[in-house]
Image (tube, grey):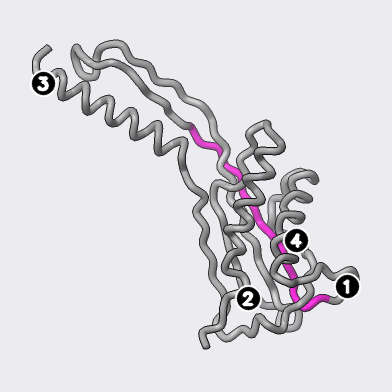
Amino acid sequence: MDWKVNGKVVRFASLAIFFILTSSTRAQQVTYNYMPGTDFTKYHTFKWVQIPSNVHPNQIVEQEIQQAVNNVLASKGLTLATRDKADLYVGYQCSVDQERQWNAWGMGGGLRWGGMGSATSSTITNGMLAVDFYDPTTQQLIWRGSAAQTLNPSGNQEKDMQKLNKAVAKLLKHFPPQSKS
């Protein structure tokens, strides 16, 4: 083999490894935003509300999402209201999309990429979860956070719950926002 073929082999192998690593190790990307000037210290109880335009998952996933959020909010000192009145309304929205994932590997040589190689594709599910907090008095959105790569069913219930709990903890890490005093 001459150097040019080896260069192609190295480039192809590098590209294949890059695509394999980036497609399988996508991290949960979390973003949040809140209404400036809101006094978050006045909120002590919360109540779940339905967001009409939301595409709801099945009842099991809906309960898992709510339980994960309830647990994090309880750890922050907020209490789930047992009556109609609450200081804060909480709703969630989610979207689940599917995309094609390509995995390639091989040994180079020959024309173009040549040699022995293989590429397979599979369908992966990407789930985005957004949690919204509303002030019931003003009926305004006061905080919103979203996490990508959160609702990705794997067929392993325990693994999916661990991933959801981790994502919700990361998502609500900055709720409520710390005052800048």
Amino acid on which disc 2 is placed:
Ile
Q: Secondary structure at mark 4?
A: helix
In the image, 107 versus 53, the foreground residue is: 107
Disc assigned to residue 84: 1
Instruction: Tell me the residue at 61%/63% (across/down).
Output: 172
The quadrant in which the N terminus is found is: top left
Mark 4 and mark 2: Cα distance apart in space: 18 Å
Mark 4 and mark 3: Cα distance apart in space: 59 Å
Residue bearing mark 2: 142
* Residue 10 magenta-highlighted: no
Q: Nearer the viewer, mark 3 or mark 1?
A: 3
Crowding at mark 1 (Cα within 10 Å: few <14, some 14-19, many 20+): few
Dominant secondary structure, magenta: strand
Residue bearing mark 3: 4
Whichever of labels 4 and 1 marks the residue nearer the N terminus, that label is: 4
**Which residue is at the far bottom?**
181
Whichever of labels 2 and 3 marks the residue nearer the N terminus, that label is: 3
Q: Nearer the viewer, mark 4 or mark 2?
A: 4
Whichever of labels 4 and 2 marks the residue nearer the N terminus, that label is: 4
Q: Position of residue 125 (x, y in %)?
A: 57, 38
Residue bearing mark 4: 70
Q: Nearer the viewer, mark 4 or mark 3?
A: 4
Residue 136, picture quadrant: bottom right
Residue 112, picture quadrant: top left
Mark 2 and mark 3: Cα distance apart in space: 59 Å
In the image, 140 versus 120, the foreground residue is: 120
Asked whether disc 4 touches disc 1, contact meaning CB atoms under 8 Å apart, the reply is no
Asked whether disc 4 touches disc 3, contact meaning CB atoms under 8 Å apart, the reply is no
* Magenta residue span: 86-100
